Image: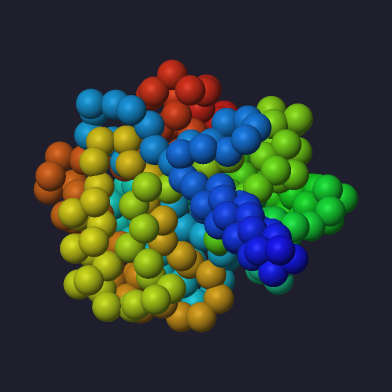
Amino acid sequence: MNRKRWGIGVLALLVVLFGLWQLSKARTFQVFGELHHRVETSEKVVALTFDDGPSPANTPPLLALLAQHQVKATFFMVGRNIEAHRELAARVISEGHQVGNHSYSHKRLVFRSPSTIQEEISRTDALLREVGARGEIFFRAPFGKKLLVLPWLLARDNRKHIIFDVVPDDHATQDASLLTSRVLEATRPGSIILLHDGWATKPGTIEATRRILEGLKAQGYRFVTVSELLALAGKGSPAPDP
Ligand SMILES: [Zn+2]
């Protein structure tokens, strides 16, 4: 009898853990507030986003490529990397790109206290303001992970949580051809593409970005910031010019 009860208990725990894991990585649902992984539109518009920077290895070559193509992107920055590279963060803003908050230390913000999560958000907001960010600052959770506390804190402050629908996985591979083909196949009108400019040198990401800019433009796509993308779908107003 006891054994049977233990079995049922363990099974119930596994079901709950599986449910929490699914909830933590869901792209279309969170318990509180606004979560956007793409927008519904028939217009050929797409938002390029770069996470984890700024990084002297990757951000400057990406800025050069974006300038060459006259494209504005959105950079979800990590607070401690802004602290280490303030001028570069300021440059991203002064070149007309949107910046978002990607936490201070890039820890998974699940199973942590509300005060720890709030600190991760507030510290990075303050750094973004210091380097020139104006208007609404969107948030993107490290690893896209959230459960209850993070969505609750964001909803309380009317903050939008932005994730993505096109994930070429440039952490796992730096094969530019593979990254490009994954993006070109998965992108549809209203998509939000996830790439990374943080930390180690990412030559594959930079080369793939060049090919993605050329490839999607050839398909008739226009690149916009996440703010502009949401505004096009009637989900918010674009941030004022920096
Ligand atoms: Zn990240």
Which residue is located at x 27 percent, y 67 percent? 179
Farthest front residue in view: 1
Query: Total of numbered circles in the picture?
Result: 0
Which residue is located at x 63 percent, y 30 percent? 33
Q: Depth check: 205 or 95 in front?
A: 205
Q: Can residue 63 be seen in this view?
A: no
Which residue is located at x 37 percent, y 47 percent? 165
User: What is the x, y in percent for residue 29?
Assistant: 51, 38
Quarter of the image for the N terminus: give it.
bottom right
Q: Depth check: 16 or 196 in front?
A: 16
Q: Can residue 84 be seen in this view?
A: yes
Q: Depth check: 202 or 242 in front?
A: 202
The answer to whether residue 40 is above or below residue 37 is: above
User: What is the x, y in percent for residue 79?
Assistant: 70, 60
Could you say which quadrant of the image residue 92 lies in?
bottom right
The answer to whether residue 106 is above or below residue 163 is: below
Q: In this view, does 12 lie to the left or right of 130?
A: left
User: What is the x, y in percent for residue 231?
Assistant: 44, 24
Q: In this view, does 164 lie to the left or right of 16?
A: left
The answer to whether residue 231 is above or below residue 31 is: above
Farthest left residue in view: 218
Quarter of the image for the C terminus: give it.
top right
> What sort of colour scheme is used for the picture?
rainbow
Q: Depth check: 19 or 9 in front?
A: 9
Could you say which quadrant of the image residue 213 lies in?
bottom left
Q: In this view, does 170 lie to the left or right of 215?
A: right
Farthest top residue in view: 234
Which residue is located at x 34 percent, y 77 percent? 173
User: What is the x, y in percent for residue 13?
Assistant: 66, 58
Q: In which quarter of the image is ligand 1?
A: bottom right
